[in-house]
Amino acid sequence: MRRRVHLALLGLAAVTAATVPATALAQTPFPEKPVRIVVPYPPGGATDVSARLLAGEMTKQIGQTVIVENKPGVAGVIGTDMVAKSAADGYTLVFGGPGNLTLRPIMDPNLSYKVDKDLAPISHVVTYDHVFVVRNGLPARNIQEFIKVAKERKLTYGSSGSGGPQHLAMELFKHMTQTDLTHVPYKGEAPAMLDLVGERVDAAIISTAVAGQLIKGGKVRAIAATNPYRSKTFPELPTVSEAGVTGYEMESYGGLLAPAGTPAPVIEKLQRVAMAAMKVPSVQQQFHEAGLFPIGGSATDLTKLLRKEREKWAPIIKSSGVKLE
């Protein structure tokens, strides 16, 4: 009798084990180990700075260390693809922007990942000011003087990489001003700025997070803001549109995403933590001091932004004829 009862209990345990895991998994606290944010660009750029400031505050709030790991290459494609193919458990995230989430996908229909299919938005974290800067030795102190010089001689410009937002922003400028500038792509904003300071390239469109201190220190010259509004860091600068290239604008963003299929409760928790982190006054102050402008938007906000940016840039890229290099 005891043997029959024992066997019955074992059978009940087996049935219970087969039906409980999903519920038990849902109740497993997240996170149980460190969370990794992949920045698909080199250290030192606006994306990297933003991710590190966010990660520092998320670490305090989420109960686990949030690590930032740089995986640069192909204008953000390599790191983004790695995250898109990672386990959908919330432990590997990507900090993306126009280059890897908007522009490259438009320009390369055979890209190894599809933003809408392979990634799940978490939060619209930040927006970036960008400025049009030139080397000190170039005789151009405003946009109209730059256009004049560019039509008189061959000029070069640096960018954070082929197919990235700064590349496309300058190609749009070329298209709208009928100037012919030679593109020199770099592996990130920081090396592009080093060559501009060294006067090895003539111009660049760079975030104020990277260029701000160099401009203030007189190492390079800012001649206009490229956003549709004046720079918050350099409000005295006219926008490119105000300077005579009517309708020109380039605005950049940073957002946090997870692999598609990440459980909704995990996405919701990451969203709550990211949004809360961006509301901390000391964090906002750090962002402002770095020339970055905290948003702290939701997953829905980021989804809408990605759609809006895609709709905006697709016809611009097509009409300008810009190609991947």
Image (tube, rainbow, N blue to C red):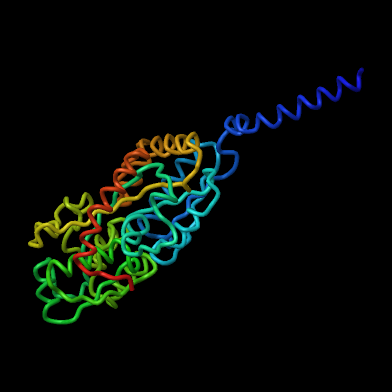
Q: Position of residue 168 (x, y in %)?
A: 26, 64
Q: Position of residue 134 (x, y in %)?
A: 21, 69
Most foreground residue, 81 or 218: 81
Most foreground residue, 54 or 324: 324
Residue located at (66% from left, 29% from top): 19
User: Number of callouts in the render?
Assistant: 0
Q: Is residue 201 left or right of residue 41?
A: left
Q: Position of residue 286 (x, y in %)?
A: 35, 45
Q: Where the C terminus falls, by quadrant?
A: bottom left
- Please tell me in which quadrant of the rendered image residue 187 appears: bottom left
Q: Where the N terminus falls, by quadrant?
A: top right
Q: Is residue 28 above or below residue 210?
A: above
Task: Give the residue at the far top of this rendering.
Answer: 1
Most foreground residue, 250 or 233: 250
- Please tell me in which quadrant of the rendered image residue 184 appears: bottom left
Task: Give the residue at the far bottom of this rendering.
Answer: 153
Q: Is residue 170 above or below residue 120?
A: below
